Amino acid sequence: MKPGKDYIGVGGGVLILDDDGRFLMMKRGGEVRNECGWWSKPGGKVDFGETSVDAMIREIKEEVGVEIEIFGILPHTDHIIEDENQHWVAVNYLARIKSGEPKIMEPHKCDELRWFGVNEELPEKITQTTREPVEYYLAGKYIEI
């Protein structure tokens, strides 16, 4: 049984901001669960018995090699990918880097890392789970935690 395919999966991601207000995105590589070739914020699935905050801290360390401090929560995303017959509920957080420099830690899952400015045009192929949180952030629709 696979989450997202055989039952609704729970996952999420983190909009990581730098001191200039830019956010980090990754281009999804060949061995990702869905939406290969699309840009997204780092994140992943929540494991059984793991809180969503702990899952995101773990996923960010695994994917981009940095320690983060989560400071906000954005509205969730109902991520239904009809073309891939997948259904996920994604929690969305805001964070800053506590230590480390972002780098690709899983080259089989990530083709590129890049910082994007808030006024910069975003790539055409951006995941719903990233597009919505960026829109929420820019509109001030988040809760500081």
Image (cartoon, helix red, strand yellow):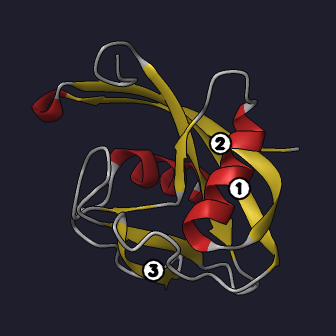
Q: Residue at x 58, y 60 (%)?
A: 138
Q: What amino acid is labelled 3 in the image? A: Leu
Element carrying mark 3: strand
**Residue identified by numbered label 1:** 94
Q: Are marks 2 and 1 in contact (CB under 8 Å)?
A: yes
Q: Are marks 3 and 1 in contact (CB under 8 Å)?
A: no
Residue furthest to the top = 7
Q: Residue at x 52, y 83 (%)?
A: 115
76 to the left or right of 30:
right
Whether residue 47 is situated above or below residue 100 in the rendered picture:
above
**Residue identified by numbered label 2:** 74
Query: For mark 2, does the 10 Å Cα neighbourhood hold few (<14), some (14 to 19), or many (20 or more) residues?
Result: many
Element carrying mark 2: strand
Q: Of circles 2 and 3, which is in front? A: 3
**Residue identified by numbered label 3:** 113
Mark toward the start of the polypeptide (2 vs 3): 2
Asked whether residue 140 is in view, the answer is no
Q: Position of residue 87 (x, y in %)?
A: 33, 23
Q: What amino acid is labelled 2 in the image? A: Leu
125 to the left or right of 40:
left
Q: Position of residue 128 (x, y in %)?
A: 35, 46
- Residue 55 location, quadrant: top right
Give the camera-side residue of 144 and 127. Answer: 127
Mark toward the start of the polypeptide (3 vs 1): 1
Looking at the rendered image, the quarter that the C terminus falls into is top right
Q: Are marks 2 and 3 in contact (CB under 8 Å)?
A: no
Looking at the rendered image, the quarter that the N terminus falls into is top left
Whether residue 145 is situated above or below residue 38 in the rendered picture:
above
Distance in Å between CA atoms under marks 3 and 1: 17 Å
